Each structure stands twice: as C-alpha cells, then as structure tokens.
Image (cartoon, rainbow, N blue to C red):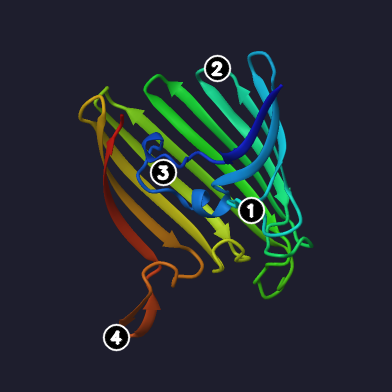
Amino acid sequence: VLLKAGKFVTFEGIEVIESKDNFNITRGHLFGFAEPYTHVGVLAGYAFPKIADVWVGVVNGWDLHTDNNYGKTFLTKIGLNFGSMLWGALSFSRGAEQNDNTNYARTSLDSTWFVKPHEKVTIGLQQNIGEEEGLSTHPTRLGGAAHWYGLGIQPKVDICKQFSVGSRYEWFSDLDGPRTTVRHVAQTVSLTPTFNLTESLMFRLEYRYDWSGYDKTVYGGLYETSDGVYSKGETSTVSTEFVYKF
C-alpha cells in the first residue's frame, strides 16, 4: 500500500508543469481549462504486479491550499502499463469547487495515453469530459449543469539525439461556458522543433495557431472592413525557449 499526503500534481493530462518534460513550449487548452494543476490532500494507492496501479483519495479541490467550502473532492485513478509501447491512465474526480457552496459538484473524467509505435516516435492522446452543476450560460440551460469536452493528440519524433520535433492538435468545446466564461469551441495546432545544444542546454522554437469555431471574438478581436465589422477569430504565436537542466 502506497500513501501520499500534502501537495501533488493532478493525475490528468498529457502536459505537466515542468516545461522541459513537454513536447511543446506553450500549454494547450486542456491543461489550462479542462483539468486542475495541483491538489492538497491525501491519497492511498496499491500497485498490482507488472501492469496496474490504483489510487483513491480526498483533496481540498482544484488548485487550492485551503478549501473554499465545506465539501471535499474525491479522486481516483487507474494506471495501466503494457510495456514500452503503451501506457496511460483513467482518472476521475468529483466534488464541490465553488466558493462557500457545497450544493453544486464538479465532475471530471480523463483518459490519457502514450503510444510508442517506433523507438523514435511517441504519441500522447487525451480525452476529457467534464461537468459543473449550476453554471451553464447556454440560453436553453441557463443555471443548469454546464459541460465541456476535449480531445488532444501530441506526436513527437526524435530525428536524432540532438534534434526532435514535437507537435499538438487540440479541440476543446466550452459551449456552456463554465471553464472559459465564453461559449465557444477552441482549436489549436503547434509545431515545435527542439535542438539539444549540449547535455544540459536545450533550445526550442514553436509556431502556434489558435482559432474559434463559435465565438469569433475570442481570438483576434473585431476587425472593420468596407463591408462592415467582422470577427477574425484566430491568432498566431511564435515562441522561443532556452532550458538549462542541472
């Protein structure tokens, strides 16, 4: 039996807090909106021989040191390891997350997997489904349960020891508006060449393109033309990063 108490990172998602361990420089929509970063609480786990480990526990909530209400959040995870070619986890959380309100619960179900079809290719896959009661901004479900859905794929190809290319595609639907406060469907693609200059120094360059398929004011704002005002609904970003590991 394994015990964990204190502050620890979430079970959910492909991307992590430490930038050096991600395939891209920036984080996707699922990392920022569909899942928490950290928890404070206690977990108990059991590792079955070779393939599976199971964890259950209670925490103060999503990204909270001190709980913001009288309810606790329940966590559970089933990790599966089928060897060097396939490993991943199914994660579930449910609990009251709103300030001074234990009547409405937030639920998250996450499935994250890593596939390695070739020694130089790694593919991260994620599916996330969430719900929070009492927060819908949809006209036909105002004040009811709000839902969000997300899909992500992140391939990485190691060309050689000194050079690799990471990439990402994500689709995130927040049409009830609980996570972003705006009813929209966001999509993003990224391409990130990585250069290992030395054993300790890494340089990365990322091109990222985001667009919204529902509310076009989310990206780019309003643009005026001779025909009137229209919304661009898209944005491009270029990022660079040096990482020194020691």
Image: 177 above or below 208: below
Q: Which residue is mark 3?
A: 168
- Marks 2 and 1, the one that precedes in the sequence: 1
Give the percent coordinates (x, y) of residue 23: 38, 37
Residue sitting nearer the eye, 16 or 64: 64
- Quadrant in which the N terminus is drawn: top right
- Marks 3 and 1, the one that precedes in the sequence: 1
Q: Which residue is mark 4?
A: 226
- Please report contact status of discs 2 and 1: CB closer than 8 Å, yes or no: no
Q: Which residue is mark 1?
A: 66
Residue most extreme to the left: 197
The amino acid pointed to by label 1 is: Thr
Distance between the alpha carbons at the discs numbered 2 and 4: 60 Å
Crowd band around label 4 with a 10 angstrom C-alpha radius: few (<14), some (14–19), many (20+): few
The amino acid pointed to by label 4 is: Ser
Distance between the alpha carbons at the discs numbered 3 and 1: 34 Å
Labels 2, 1: front one: 1
71 horizontally vs 184: left or right: right
Labels 3, 1: front one: 1
Distance between the alpha carbons at the discs numbered 3 and 4: 36 Å
Give the percent coordinates (x, y) of residue 162: 24, 26
SS for tag 2? Answer: loop
Residue sitting nearer the eye, 241 or 231: 241
Give the percent coordinates (x, y) of residue 17: 45, 42
- Please report contact status of discs 3 and 1: CB closer than 8 Å, yes or no: no
Q: Which residue is mark 2?
A: 83
- Quadrant in which the C terminus is drawn: top left
The amino acid pointed to by label 3 is: Arg
22 horizontally vs 172: left or right: left
